[in-house]
Amino acid sequence: MLEVREIFRPEITDDIYKSAGIKRPEDCDSTIGIFDGGELLATASIRDNILVGFAVSSRARGEGLLATLCTALINIGMSNGHRTFYIFTKPEKAFLFSACGFREIARNPPYSALLEWGETSVDQYVQKLRAFSRDKPDGAGCIVMNANPFTLGHRYLAEYAAGESRWLYVVVVEAEKSIFPFHVRMELIQKGLRDLPNVTVLGGGQYVISALTFPTYFSKEGDVGPAQTGLDLALFCSYIAPALKVKRRYVGEEPYCETTRAYNKSMKAALPPRGIEVVEIPRKEKDGEYISASHVRNLIREGKTEQTKKLLPESTYEFLLTPEGEEIAEKIRHSNDRHG
């Protein structure tokens, strides 16, 4: 009789992953297996609301075990408060999960496909975007920014893009992977751009540079290329740009961060064939140095918050002096993460 149970020693799945030719996922919240007595027939894991690491032994394929794994992991995720779930898989395997009720929303051949299931969907996100753009002109510009924190460099990029655009959308990365939380970054960007009459600031949700669409952005890993950036850019081209009527995406030149520089390169290759121009703006300098959020964080880390004043809009600098800003500064001083 088959039994589904949680696996507390993930290394016992190594043989089944080796036979399937895939790498065992790490840093998961929970791993489950389907057992026939003491034999492991299938396994998969969940990380936040993402289902990962599906592997089925050769003798059990075609017996519907994927559906059993999906159901069990969704129940675990729901018990942790999630209501929407995602699966990454190879494009040629996507149909297997479609049969389990998941819907494919993006594809990055030959690397990956992204599927979703649950209460919310990319279509609902698109409806929200269309509400923002309903009375706005066609041919808009767009900037996607993390702004950790919002600097005069971000302000320069937005001001430049707004000057060239009939309307500009500044899409803020919502993923809570940065030392400045989303609600703070959102507020500082809104305050820093409130004098520009043709700018709308909005959140990127799950579908713009998130742990779902572009996990490498938030890690120290190198080798960022089409395999890592393709889903994020496919979602932008298929859903976000059409909903906001975007025809031009602005990016800042990146002299420091290898990941962002590689992402810019991928954009230049992927977006123009889809009818979206990519405009790269030289990084703004101050006293012979490029202005960057990482430089601001380094100054804070060194206890030189006052020196950040020349690099920040007044609203950002004033925030750093508040109790919440001081709390974030203290976290920065004890962090070695590149986003912290």
Image (tube, grey):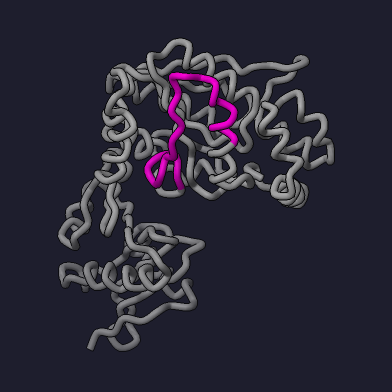
Residue displayed at 73% across by 17% down: 286
User: In the visual, does 205 lie left or right of 189?
Assistant: left
Residue displayed at 49% across by 47% down: 175
Quarter residue 111 falls in: top left
User: In the visual, does 243 lie left or right of 333?
Assistant: left
In this rendering, the answer to whether 29 lies above or below 129 is: below
Quarter residue 147 falls in: top right
Residue displayed at 67% across by 33% down: 316
Quadrant for the N terminus in the image:
bottom left
Residue placed most toward the observer, 324 or 54: 324
Q: Residue reaching furthest top?
A: 164
In this rendering, the answer to whether 69 lies above or below 272 is: below
Q: How many marks?
A: 0
Quadrant for the C terminus in the image:
top right
In this rendering, the answer to whether 58 lies above or below 22 is: below
Q: Position of residue 216 (x, y in %)?
A: 50, 43
Residue placed most toward the observer, 60 or 124: 124
Let me know if residue 335 appears in the view.
no
Residue range of the region highlighted in magenta in the rendering: 188-210
Q: Is residue 197 magenta?
A: yes
User: In the visual, does 50 lie left or right of 327?
Assistant: left
Let me know if residue 260 appears in the view.
yes
Residue placed most toward the observer, 241 or 26: 241
Q: Position of residue 121 (x, y in %)?
A: 27, 50
Q: Position of residue 245 (x, y in %)?
A: 29, 24
Q: Is residue 205 magenta?
A: yes
Q: Position of residue 129 (x, y in %)?
A: 32, 36
